Amino acid sequence: MLFVVLTLALLSCGGGRERFQVEVLNGFTPVKDQGKSQTCWAYAMLAAIETEHIMRGDSVNLSAAWVERMMKEHETAAPASGRAVGWTLISMIGKYGLVTYDAMKTVDDIPPRFAFMLGAMYTPLEFAHSVCAPGEWVALGSSKAHPYYEPFLFDVPDNWEHNRLLNLPMDSLLSVTERAVRRHHGICWEGDTSEQGFDWKQGVARTSLLQGSTTDDHCMAIVGLARDASGEPFFVMKNSWGTRGGYDGLLYMSFEYFKQKTLAIYMTREAAGW
């Protein structure tokens, strides 16, 4: 399966957009469009898994539609909206498996009975375990209201599974995330995109206009690192709103925005250094 690695020139120029100097750009599959679906959590976590496999020299392109369909058919606790948190993806594929994007592109497609990869046939559960081993991924967060280095309940409405996050100081969470990206690992970010400082049209999220409390709005994958003209560090984010706006589906999030508006980070144990 094909994956995308955009060039420095594409990311740093064009149409009056702000220029960024890209330091790291990891491999990722083509940007997808979740449309009216509220399953950004599935798209972002699958994008992180895809990048993780590209780093290992393996290419997979995975179906968010399968996950959404399985959740709607089997999870009575799931809201009709389809909203959830990033860790829900890990839970869903652990229960119901996974298939490739080409096998099921929309939630209305007929769910396939098998998944095929490199000439091999798998059941959906076998395929899910081949791309995401049980216990491989960890969920991290930062909350001053709970003891650091201990799990705490991720207390947001979309966490209907009552998942927990390992609590790290925010500076540590930022450091672990930056290090993992530099080592080419896949990362899923969950946090607040409702602020005026988050400008999808311009493709930039900054702290200059931040206001209000942090809410759980959106998930995206982190695929790179960059700096603006003043040298301020940014993460390169892969979104799931198609290629409209931003930088052909990518967005630059400043480290300061990350520190103020991040709720959860998902990565492999290897990426976290455990």
Image (cartoon, rainbow, N blue to C red):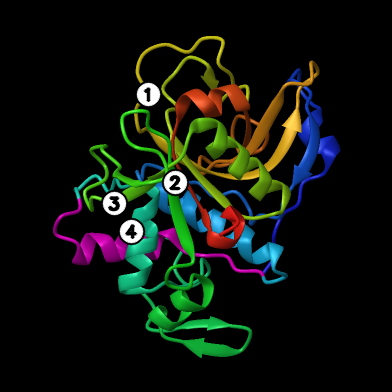
- Residue 13 location in percent, x, y? 81, 27
Q: Is residue 62 magenta?
A: yes
Which residue is denoted by mark 1 in the rendering?
214
Magenta segment: 59-78
Amino acid type at image mark 1: Thr
Camera-nearest residue between 238 and 114: 238
Camera-nearest residue between 55 and 124: 55
Which residue is denoted by mark 2 in the rendering?
140
Residue 201 visible within the image: yes
* Residue 258: quadrant of the picture: top right
229 displayed left or right of 72: right
Asked which secondary structure carries label 2, the reply is: strand
Q: Is residue 93 magenta?
A: no
Which residue is denoted by mark 3 in the rendering?
163
Closest to the camera, between mark 3 and mark 4, is 3
232 displayed left or right of 21: left
Q: Which mark is residue 68?
A: 4
- Residue 253 location in percent, x, y? 60, 29
Q: Residue drawn 21% across and 65% down?
A: 73
